[in-house]
Amino acid sequence: MLLLFVGIVVVTGFAAVLAAVLDAGPDSPDSEVFFEDPVADMAFQLVGIAIGIPVVLWGARYLGRRPAGTVSSVLGRLRWKWLGLCAAVAVPMIIVQFGIMIAWTWGEESAEPAGDGFPGWTAFLVSLAVLGALVPFQAAAEEYVFRGWLVQVIGRAVRSPWPAVVIASLLFALAHGFGELSGFILLFYSALWWGWLVIRTGGLEAVITMHAANNLLAFGLAAGFGELASTETAADAPWQAMAVEFVFAPLYCLVMARIADRKGVARVSPGEGPRAGAGTELAAGAGTELAAGAGAGAGPAAAAAVGPGLAASHASTPGPASGPAAAPAYGPEPVPAPEPVPGPEPAPESRPASGPVSAPGSGPEPAPGSRVEP
């Protein structure tokens, strides 16, 4: 937390100094922005939030004494193929969600643009380029802090991940400031579903893509209407946005959870839970993944391996025992070989009086194709 605070202060201080040196600050001394140009000011705000990514990764590695990638997913890295699939679902879904919300509020005074209007194609394209380069990192940083690191830290002290999800979701909503009650409920409700999705899919990829898609579209619309200088956040969202989110947050999360099941996406670290059945991808393979139920480790080594939302104390269904006895038998059981039937006892007088007794199976090898009687 101290490193996050220091990082934000450093970025903010650099922005203030740069604005003063370039004489690019606002005309009003009471302004809340550093740069008169809203794109430049927004860029530094986004960087100030994005600083959370290296801070969290560094903290996990050197303070948490575990691989930094365990904040990203249960496989210790971002699963880029899965992230791309999540984006293919999140982008069209967020476009439909925004379209419904705009159509619902069309004509209302509260929904009318309050900016300076379209800034021109050059300024608009520059804004989109800056937003496209920085918003994904800003959105990912919030997920690394609230759905990744914070849930993991709290989760180490409790037996269930849900208290950690609730606390992190509450802090996520409060971090956006105090606005409308509908905006606070929207943020808290969405964060709860996203926290569930992180545990359900074993990583941050699905929530990073939805968060980034949401922010990119919101900032893009703001740039188009000349509203980048606005100080409003999601905490100021109207009740219509809250109502639409009540439908689309669970819809996206349930769809992605279903896709994750079908694709065999890992939910626990390799070795932390039962392996999936045939047809799924195994995490132990080259670049493949393991589909299994949520589980927990049993010591410091396991605590370092669990992914977002999973702590070493979380209860789970125990995995199969190791060893030959645990290996499943596929196909019909083998038929046991019949026991040999002993032959008749030789007569006493036929036994040699002295000399070594030949061991069974000793003597010359039978000729090929001959039959040996027991």
Image: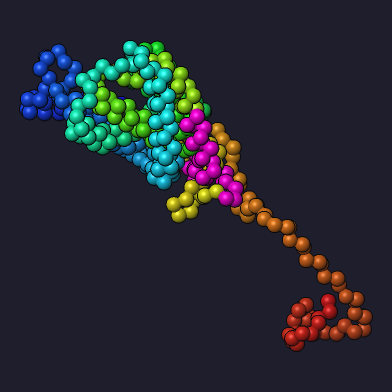
Q: Pick the residue in front: 135 or 356.
A: 135
Query: What segment is highlighted magenta in the picture?
Result: 251-279
Q: Pick the residue in front: 365 or 16.
A: 16
Q: Is residue 124 left or right of residue 285?
A: left
Task: From the top left corner, tell me how far across and down residue 300 is, in percent.
Answer: 45, 38
- Quadrant of the image for the N terminus? top left
Q: Name which quarter of the figure residue 336 lies in.
A: bottom right
Q: Name which quarter of the figure residue 31 lies in.
A: top left
Q: Is residue 132 left or right of residue 182?
A: left
What residue lies at 49% left-to-right and 43% top-to-bottom? Answer: 266
- Residue 120 visible within the image: yes
Q: Name which quarter of the figure residue 261 lies in.
A: top right
What residue lies at 90% left-to-right and 76% top-to-bottom? Answer: 345
Task: From the top left corner, tell me how far across and down residue 220 is, in percent.
Answer: 29, 29
Judge whether residue 278 is colored magenta: yes
Q: Is residue 293 left or right of residue 98?
A: right
- Quadrant of the image for the C terminus? bottom right
Task: From the top left corner, tell me how far across and down residue 326 is, in percent.
Answer: 63, 50
Task: From the top left corner, tell me how far across and down residue 308 is, in percent.
Answer: 43, 35
- Residue 148 visible within the image: no
Q: Pick the residue in front: 68 or 356.
A: 68
What residue lies at 81% left-to-right and 81% top-to-bottom? Answer: 372
- Image label count: 0
Judge whether residue 100 is colored magenta: no
Q: Pick the residue in front: 206 or 75.
A: 206
What residue lies at 31% left-to-right and 16% top-to-bottom? Answer: 112
Colouring method of the image:
rainbow
